């Protein structure tokens, strides 16, 4: 896989291997001290880290915008929409730019977070690291662990039933092609789809049951205020609904109600994901319209449930947290 990311332990954010090359990039830009976030504000994984850093009280995060293209490192253009720009950010680089790839140790993705010169990836694991640091309650940490366990399924699901058709139609102009080629219509068999949707069902049913056991649906999975667990799970409803096209509202009404309340509270760090991401989702819907009309529709796996029993052994209950694999196969580039 050409993997340059190492995962030290199950629940520590995935450390990017630090090389002379990426250390040099950090140092020459002054990114080797404090917290520097690299993200695309509207992205479903970036917003998780941005929201979590706010909740963890990290007020001095310096953000670098990562655009979905191959643009070289530059100043943020004046015309860039404020909502797409991280507060106080001045720089921008493309996720497909070779320097960004080198910075990320060969695995160019967002979010990537530098903390005192060490780079980390994997949004939900970054949330867990913050939860450990602020000594969040065990119930919050446990739910973050569940989010970590679901993260890979979640991203694979939205790629397969959503993003792939759009990126393919655009000849992968926005993203690293290798991250998407294995997914999408015709690239996975029914067994994979069944196992994947059973994982979504198990996890969403678990979240629905957590909310059923609460006396009041208030936008939070735990307690009366937003926790890092809500940050770790921030993208699951909107991304599954708008990108994968899953009828979340129909199948998981409490989860949906909870999301609508949380969304309305506009948590700091979420503006672009809440307001701009749905626009991207429209392109995804258009790109998938023909396939969905012909039956390449995630909802068929929920509709089938009524008429056909799903074999128990393929259904995975809320699975153990495992770090998502690094998917990049491309060669590293010299700076
Ligand atoms: N499991 C990772 C997924 C990261 C990820 O796939 N990020 C996407 C944006 S949501 C990305 O970087 N896409 C650009 C690309 O694949 O080239 C996480 O949760 O941080």
Image (spheres, rainbow, N blue to C red):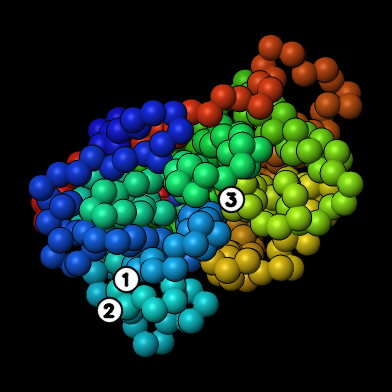
Left/right placement of residue 281 relative to residue 46 reads right
**Residue 19, image x and y in percent?**
15, 44
**Residue 238, image x and y in percent?**
67, 55
Left/right placement of residue 100 relative to residue 205 reads left
Mark 3 and mark 2: span between their CA atoms? 32 Å
Discs 3/2, front: 3
Left/right placement of residue 244 relative to residue 104 reads right
Q: What residue is shown with label 1? A: 92
Circle 2 SS class: strand
Q: Nearer the viewer, residue 228 or 134?
A: 134
Circle 3 SS class: helix
- Can see residue 150? no
Residue at x 89% of width, y 47% of height = 215
Question: Tags 1 and 2 in contact by the CB under 8 Å rule?
Answer: yes
Mark 3 and mark 1: span between their CA atoms? 27 Å
Q: What residue is shown with label 3? A: 228
Quarter residue 74 falls in: bottom left
Discs 3/1, front: 3
32 versus 178 height, above or below? below
Total count of labels: 3
**How many C-alpha atoms fall within 10 Å of the one at disc 3: few (<14), some, or many (≥20)?**
many
Mark found first going from the N terminus, 1 or 2: 2
- Would the CB of label 2 be found within 8 Å of ligand 1? no
**Residue 66, image x and y in percent?**
36, 64
Residue at x 77% of width, y 34% of height = 205
Mark found first going from the N terminus, 3 or 1: 1
Mark 1 and mark 2: span between their CA atoms? 6 Å
188 versus 101 height, above or below? above
Residue at x 74% of width, y 13% of height = 312
Q: Which residue reaches farthest bottom? A: 78
**Residue 49, image x and y in percent?**
48, 55
Q: What residue is shown with label 2? A: 75
């Amino acid at each position: 896989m050409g993997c340059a990311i190492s995962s030290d332990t199950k629940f520590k954010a995935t450390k990017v291997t630090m090389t002379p090359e990426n250390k040099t990039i950090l140092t020459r830009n002054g990114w080797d001290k404090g917290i520097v976030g690299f993200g695309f504000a509207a992205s479903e994984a970036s917003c998780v880290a941005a929201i979590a850093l706010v909740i963890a009280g990290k007020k001095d995060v310096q953000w670098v915008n990562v655009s979905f293209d191959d643009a070289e490192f530059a100043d943020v253009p004046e015309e860039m929409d404020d909502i797409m720009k991280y507060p106080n950010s001045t720089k921008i680089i493309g996720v497909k730019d070779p320097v960004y790839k080198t910075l990320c140790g060969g695995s160019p993705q967002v979010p990537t977070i530098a903390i005192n010169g060490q780079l980390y990836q994997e949004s939900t694991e970054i949330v867990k690291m913050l939860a450990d640091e602020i000594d969040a309650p065990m119930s919050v940490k446990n739910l973050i662990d569940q989010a970590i366990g679901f993260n890979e399924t979640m991203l694979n699901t939205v790629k397969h039933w959503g993003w792939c058709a759009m990126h393919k139609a655009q000849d992968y102009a926005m993203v690293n092609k290798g991250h998407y080629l294995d997914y999408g219509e015709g690239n996975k068999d029914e067994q994979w789809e069944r196992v994947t949707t059973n994982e979504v069902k198990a996890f969403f049913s678990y979240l629905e049951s957590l909310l059923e056991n609460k006396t009041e649906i208030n936008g939070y999975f735990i307690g009366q205020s937003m926790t890092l667990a809500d940050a770790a799970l921030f993208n699951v409803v909107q991304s599954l609904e708008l990108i994968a096209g899953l009828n979340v509202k129909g199948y998981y009404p409490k989860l949906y109600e909870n999301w609508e309340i949380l969304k309305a509270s506009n948590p700091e760090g979420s503006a672009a994901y809440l307001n701009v991401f749905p626009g991207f989702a429209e392109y995804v819907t258009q790109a998938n319209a023909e396939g969905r009309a012909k039956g390449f529709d995630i909802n068929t796996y929920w509709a089938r449930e009524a008429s056909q029993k799903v074999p128990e052994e393929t259904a995975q209950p809320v699975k153990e947290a495992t770090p998502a694999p690094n998917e990049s196969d491309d060669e590293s580039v010299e700076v």
